[in-house]
Image (tube, grey):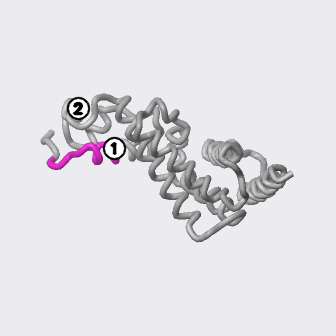
Amino acid sequence: MSPRAGLTTDAVVQLAMAVVDESGPGSLTLAKIAERAGVAAPSLYKHVKNLAELRQLIDLRVVREMAETLRAAATGREGGDAVAAVADAYRGYLRRHPHRTGALTAAPDRGGAELTAATHAVAEVVFAVLRPFGFDRARAVHATRCIRAAVHGFAGLEASGGFGLPEDVDESFEVLKKMLVQGLTNYSEQEKE
C-alpha cells in the first residue's frame, strides 16, 4: 500500500462521510477509511486523533452543510413560505443522506466550540425565518425547537422506513408544514394577547 499524496484532514472526513452514507455510522472504522485512502491505518493519525474525533468532524461538517442548506432555502422567502421552504430543505437533506440523521442530534457542547457555533448557525437561520411572526427571543427558541422536532422526527422516521401505512408520505409532509405554519401563527397571536 503506497501512501496517498495530499491526504488531508478534510479528505479523511470526506472519505468517512462516504462510508457513513453508504453503510451507516455504525460501520465507520479507521481501517475502512485507511483502505479507501490507500494508506496504512496509522497514517490517519496525522490527520485525526482517533475515531471519536473523526465522528465529531463528521458531525461538524453535517451541521455546517445543514446550515447552508437551510440558509439557501430561506433566502428571498418570508413567513409561512419560508417555514415551508426550510422544512422541505431539511427533509430533502435527510432524504439524500439518511444515515446522517444522528449527526444533526449531536449535543453541541460535547463537540466543542466549532460544533456549538455551527449548531447556532442553524438556529439563527430559523430565527430569521420566524422574525415576521414577531416572537421575542424565548418564544423564537420554543418555536425553533418545535419546528426542528417535527421536521427532524418526520425525516428520521421516513429514513428508517417508519411510515408503513399506504397513504402518501409526501401528502403527510404537506399536512405537517401546514400544521407548523398554522401553529406558529396561532402562537404568534397568543403573544399579542
Give the residue pinned by disc 1. Answer: 13
- Residue situated furthest right in the rendering: 193
Q: Residues within 10 Å of mark 2 (few under 14, many from 20)?
A: few
Residue at 29% over, 32% down: 31
Q: Position of residue 29 (x, y in %)?
A: 35, 32
Residue name at image x 70 percent, y 64 percent: 79
Would residue 13 be counted in the magenta stretch? Answer: yes
Instruction: Kindly report the distance in space between the C-alpha atoms of the residues bearing marks 1 and 2.
Output: 13 Å
Q: Is residue 97 magenta?
A: no
Residue type of the residue flagged with mark 2: Tyr
Q: Position of residue 143 (x, y in %)?
A: 70, 47
Residue at 78% x, 54% y: name it. Answer: 188
Label of residue 176 in the image:
none
Q: Is residue 161 visible?
A: no
Label drawn at residue 45 = 2
Is residue 181 among the parts visible in the rendering? yes
Residue placed most toward the observer, 78 or 67: 78
User: Bounds of the magenta span?
Assistant: 5-15
Query: Which quadrant holds the N terminus?
Result: top left
What secondary structure is the magenta-colored segment mainly?
A: helix
SS category of the residue bearing label 1 = helix
The amino acid type found where label 1 is placed reads Val
State how many labels appear: 2
Image vertical order of residue 103 relative to residue 50, above or below = below
Residue 54 x, y percent position in the rendering: 35, 35
